[in-house]
């Protein structure tokens, strides 16, 4: 299929699924779209194994390189749109827990999940080298800002806790990607040098520090341009150019494009909104980026649901995947409760906060995209399968029940 036909079918599916959800299921739209897509995929696989339509459906799904489509094209728009409405003053007030949970939480979770998978996999007949277990730990540890931001809109989490969960999810993917790339490069290079602290520190500075600096520069330049005119059509185009140009430049400079887009979005959504936009421009920018956010979120969650069609041997890894779901949740809780207790965050936050942050730490499309981006090797199908099972549980179970959990804890 050519790209126009493929996108046409994707928009048709998204529209039909969204209509069914709004009319009948009445679930949060992202969850409803993904649930319907998973159900449709399973029906086609189970009921239509011997029909030509199954091959056509697989061709449609495989025509999207999910990893490339999300990481190279969609992510920059989604992160900019998501950070555009985050209050930077509230983010700054909660900077200490956000930094601790972002850096310490991801690194601690990566190590603990890696060791846990290494020890539990043989119980299910799989023997995975420890370094590949750490690779899985790195891609599954960061919470997905796209999934988190979409669900938090519906869950009515207390404001200070929402700010911390949002801030952590926006920034921790940068740390997770650094750890993921460091381990992956060590596998490709087969050299102890690639695991040295010097190599890790250099990667961290270039990817994370460079991404933050680039995002500030893009936001600063964009703000200057917005401030110098009052023409909302041109100003909307400037924000679009910031995202596409900034993300492209980040790839050229080998810095973190996602972090650059978060910082640029925070800059424009706060400073730019305050000093550079008229009321009509604010309204048009919000409408434009709200539509982009909703449309791409629909694409993303439908594609996650459809991805089940292209995952090899998923049925062989189901029981291991279910076990990993509980491992990831337990370790997520440990990575939150340890700094929460040691740094005495209970003075600033509700005692139930670690539980809310654990259940609200959703994994989503970024984890699947990182798993699919792995080079071909013996353990790739296994890693993709258990990643998909964890993401499926996170979005459908955690996402649907987060609001009820928050309400229950408030009433206790």
Image: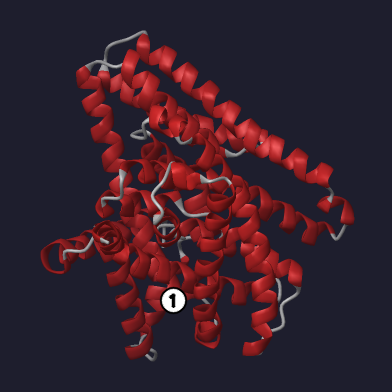
Please identify the quadrant where the C terminus is shown.
Answer: bottom left
x then y, percent, for residue 41: 35, 77
Q: Which residue is mark 1?
A: 309
Identify the residue shown where x is 27% and y is 34%. 288
Evaluate whether residue 65 shows in this view.
no
Seen in the image, is 17 located left or right of residue 297? left
Seen in the image, is 135 located left or right of residue 187? left
Q: Nearer the viewer, residue 134 or 344?
A: 344
Q: Residues within 10 Å of mark 1 (few under 14, many from 20)?
A: many
Seen in the image, is 355 located left or right of residue 408? right
The residue positioned farthest toward the top in the image shown: 228
Disc 1 is placed on an element classified as helix
x then y, percent, for residue 332: 53, 62
Evaluate whether residue 340 shows in this view.
yes
Q: Nearer the viewer, residue 243 or 176?
A: 176
Identify the residue shown where x is 49% and y is 55%. 143
x then y, percent, for residue 102: 56, 46
Q: Is residue 182 above or below residue 236?
A: below
Seen in the image, is 75 located left or right of residue 276? right
Q: Is residue 243 above or below residue 318?
A: above
């Amino acid at each position: 299929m050519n790209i126009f036909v493929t996108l046409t079918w994707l928009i048709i599916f998204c529209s039909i699924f969204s209509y069914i959800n709004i009319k009948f299921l009445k679930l949060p739209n992202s969850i409803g779209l993904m649930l319907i897509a998973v159900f449709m995929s399973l029906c086609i696989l189970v009921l239509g194994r011997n029909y030509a339509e199954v091959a056509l459906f697989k061709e449609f799904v495989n025509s999207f390189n999910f990893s490339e489509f999300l990481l190279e094209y969609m992510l920059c728009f989604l992160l900019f749109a998501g950070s555009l409405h985050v209050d930077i003053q509230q983010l700054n007030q909660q900077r200490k827990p956000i930094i601790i949970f972002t850096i310490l939480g991801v690194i601690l979770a990566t190590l603990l999940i890696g060791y846990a998978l290494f020890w539990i996999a043989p119980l299910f007949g799989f023997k995975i080298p420890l370094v590949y277990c750490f690779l899985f730990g790195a891609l599954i540890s960061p919470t997905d800002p796209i999934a988190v931001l979409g669900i938090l809109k519906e869950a009515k989490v207390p404001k200070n806790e929402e700010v911390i969960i949002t801030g952590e999810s926006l920034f921790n993917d940068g740390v997770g990607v650094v750890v993921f790339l460091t381990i992956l490069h060590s596998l490709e290079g087969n050299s102890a040098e690639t695991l040295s602290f010097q190599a890790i520190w250099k990667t961290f500075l270039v990817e994370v520090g460079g991404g933050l600096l680039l995002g500030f520069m893009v936001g600063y330049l964009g703000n200057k341009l917005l401030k110098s005119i009052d023409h909302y059509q041109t100003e909307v185009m400037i924000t679009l150019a910031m995202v596409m140009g900034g993300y492209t430049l980040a790839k050229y400079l080998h810095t973190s494009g996602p972090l650059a887009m978060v910082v640029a979005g925070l800059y424009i959504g706060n400073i730019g909104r305050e000093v550079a936009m008229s009321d009509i421009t604010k309204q048009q920018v919000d409408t434009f980026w709200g539509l982009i956010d909703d449309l791409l979120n629909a694409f993303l969650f439908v594609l996650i649901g459809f991805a089940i069609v292209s995952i090899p041997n998923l049925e062989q890894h189901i029981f291991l995947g279910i076990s990993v779901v509980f491992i990831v949740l337990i370790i997520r809780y440990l990575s939150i409760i340890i700094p929460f207790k040691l740094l005495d965050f209970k003075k600033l936050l509700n005692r139930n906060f670690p539980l809310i942050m654990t259940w609200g730490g959703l994994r989503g499309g970024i984890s699947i995209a990182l798993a699919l981006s792995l080079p071909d090797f013996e353990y790739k199908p296994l890693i993709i399968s258990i990643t998909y099972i964890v993401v499926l549980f996170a979005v459908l179970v955690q996402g649907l029940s987060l609001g009820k959990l928050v309400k229950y804890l408030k009433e206790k």
